[in-house]
Amino acid sequence: MIYLKPSNTALKKNRKTTAIVVFFLVVLFVVHFFFPRFYPSIFYPLTSFAWTIEKSVVGWFPRMGNLIKSKDSLARENERLAREIRADEISLLLFDVIKRENEELKSILGRKIEGNLILAIVLVRPPVSPYDTLIIDRGKRDGLAVGNMVYAQGDVLIGEIAEIYDNRSKVTFFSTPGKKTNISFDNSNVRAEARGRGGGNFSASVPIDVEIKEGDIVIFSDIKPHIFGIVEKVIADSVDSFETILFRSPINIHDILFVEVKTSP
Amino acid sequence: MRTVWNIGIIVSILYLPWWLSVIFITGACFFVPKFYEAVIYGILIDALYGTKFGLYGFSYVFTGIFIIIFFVSSIIRRKLLW
């Protein structure tokens, strides 16, 4: 069989092109490594426009479909009602916590809750975002700052502002894999460190003699306590002095449409 | 062909679940010769959605994944194509 030997000139040209491309990619990465805010500040104005269009277009098609298909409109209504029920359930869970905390607060004079809540629209959420992050439509111009707490459906603490731009912010969930947060359990007042497991899931270790059961509320201790999660499973080993608590946020992070950001006073 | 893949991938990064973007970019690495754009898309995903905390403290997950996919697909392509 006869093969055509590639000419030296073609090979050299090929290698040169590859070297240029690799150099370009390395430069791109180095810029991102040393200036992580550079690309987002360039791309967010463009991508935000695309995400806003998506919201109106994706919303338009189902609306037109609903005019034709009555079943679809019923399904949508059903979904909305289910979401409302879920929100109400969370509010009910919170009621007991707030009631008790309110009584405790009455005895403490001179302490007040500071900061304002700013409503923000969620532009991107998981599963589009692979990093357990949200992108919201409020930023530095609205008075937000890195570290501001982010709440969903009223009083459920879900994350904090991680990066901030002029009119966009990146929110990182407390459930981001590997992230650690101090929490306590409503029934026992024991404190623990919650470790994020992704997708709104957490795990924590507490001494085995602490009584924690499924359905218990996990709270984030602040002047005003906030619901952090609900215990789903308790794994206890008789040879271990600690038990593992698996819990999840009552909020479905794939469904979040709006969040509230608590700004510093 | 290359342009169609690129448009599809950009749309998937902006609107579709992240795992579909991974599938599309992996597919492009195998079907498009020298698909260097894969690394650019990795950097883009990390920049748009990632934070300094990343996943378990590593912020360049997708850049890393697509560099690996790019090299593996190049080797496989070289072995399979003639």
Image (cartoon, rainbow, N blue to C red):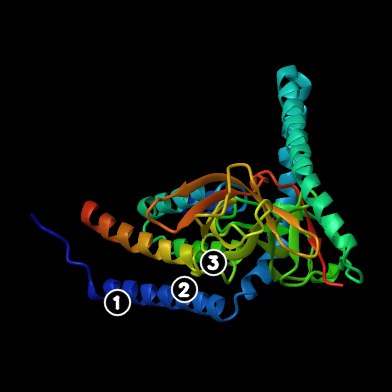
Tag 3 residue: B54
Tag 1 residue: A12
* Quarter of the figure that contains the N terminus of chain A: bottom left
Q: Pointer 3: residues within 10 angstroms few (<14), some, or many (20+)?
A: many
Identify whether A207 is placed above or below A238.
below
Residue drawn at x 47%, y 48% is A235
Chain on which label 1 sits: A
Q: Which mark sits nearer the N-terminus, 1 or 2?
A: 1
Q: Which residue is outermost to the front?
A: A209
Verify CB contact (< 8 Å) between mark 1 and mark 3.
no
Looking at the rendered structure, the kind of residue marked 2 is Leu
Toward the viewer: A95 or A166?
A95
Verify CB contact (< 8 Å) between mark 2 and mark 3.
no
What x and y, as percent, mark residue A167?
79, 66
Residue A127 visible? no
C-alpha gap between disc 1 and disc 3: 40 Å
What x and y, as percent, mark residue A47?
68, 58
Residue drawn at x 63%, y 42% is A215
Q: Secondary structure at mark 3?
A: loop
Residue A6 visible? yes
Callouts 2 and 3 on one subunit: no
Q: Select label 2 or label 3 by which is in front.
A: 3
Looking at the rendered structure, the kind of residue marked 3 is Gly
**Which of the 4 image quarters holds residue A170?**
bottom right
Residue drawn at x 51%, y 59% is A207
Tag 2 residue: A25
Q: Select label 1 or label 2 by which is in front.
A: 2
**Which of the 4 image quarters holds residue B73?**
bottom left
C-alpha gap between disc 1 and disc 2: 20 Å
Q: Pointer 2: residues within 10 angstroms few (<14), some, or many (20+)?
A: some
Chain on which label 3 sits: B
